[in-house]
Amino acid sequence: MTISVVKAWPVWQERRRVLAVLAVVEILALVAPIATWSPISKADLDLALLLVSLTVTYSLFVLGWEKARRLLLFERAPAMTPDLRATWCFASAILLPPPLAAVVTVVSASGEWPSQPAGTRRLYRFVCSSGASILAATVASWIFRHHLTLAAALPAAAAVWLAIGAGATGLAMCASGQFDAAKAMLHFHTHRLEFITMAVATAEYAAQSIGMPLLIWLSLPITVGIQRYFTTAELRAREMGARPMGEDAWLHVAQVIVEAAETVSVLRIESADPHTARTVV
């Protein structure tokens, strides 16, 4: 890799303040799992494998729907596209030691990249977002296991999880001059998906605590249902005066609609056919 190629990376077009925020987040994300290292048992590994299998299955199952949701949400608020995989990332924070929580979050984050629309993909933003998630999961896990009562540990872990994730995003927005978008991070509506996924993760913790870990599998259909509900809600709530999406974006949304339609199984519509998608558009 030549120096000229490195200099051509889009990240260098950002302000120095943004680069500083990105660097701090990434360094902390790398250091935190090492600094909070604790012994890992076989039961922890089994549980981590379960959470990884759920987040990977979710990523594969809802790829088209998730990409459509992000296209619709990106049009409304380009900097804020909440990830429903937090269902298992926050669960890992309250169920696993910090290093394993970080590993589950890394695997979960890797499944997020394919669902990002091509026109919105920025590798450095994805890396920063993933780093913030890793840092949030690691610190939340450390706090949750810091010899506190459950009544104190759970709210503390949740608060740290939200503060680090939203704080890193807000700092990056402020550093890039997006102050109005940063103010939106202070509103409850912005974080409603995080609260919902954290509630599901808390239910997973309850299932594990009562000795019924198989109930954790129910988080998969629940999260899929939440994701499809919000995708449909975004499509219905799209304002007439909003900035128009590109043809490729609408074609993808149309393809998702065709795949989900009941007539597909009856008439055998080919959702990958461009003419079908254009007709739906």
Image (spheres, rainbow, N blue to C red):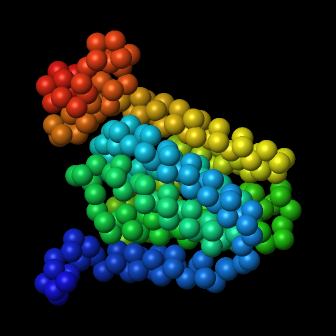
Classify the position of the N terminus by image quarter.
bottom left
Left or right: residue 271 versus residue 111 is left
Can you give x and y, in whole percent of width and height, for residue 37 in the image?
Answer: 67, 80
Q: Quadrant of residue 127?
A: bottom left
Tell me what residue is drawn at x 63 percent, y 68 percent. Answer: 100
Q: Nearer the viewer, residue 229 or 21?
A: 229
Q: From the top left corner, tell me how far across and down residue 207 is, in percent.
A: 77, 45
> Where in the figure is residue 147, as x and y percent of width and height?
84, 71
- Residue at 37% x, 25% y: name it: 260
User: Taking 129 as reference, is 136 left or right?
Assistant: right
Q: How many marks?
A: 0
In this rendering, does residue 76 appear at all? Answer: no
Q: Is 229 above or below relative to 183?
A: above
Residue 222 can be seen, yes or no: yes
Q: Residue furthest bottom?
A: 3
Q: Residue at image x 30%, y 24%? A: 258
Q: Nearer the viewer, residue 65 or 166?
A: 65
Residue 168 at what x, y percent from top left?
48, 67
Residue at the location (79% across, 72% down)? 146
Quarter occupied by the C terminus:
top left
- Residue 130, by quadrant, is bottom left
- The answer to which of 17 and 259 lies nearer the viewer is 259
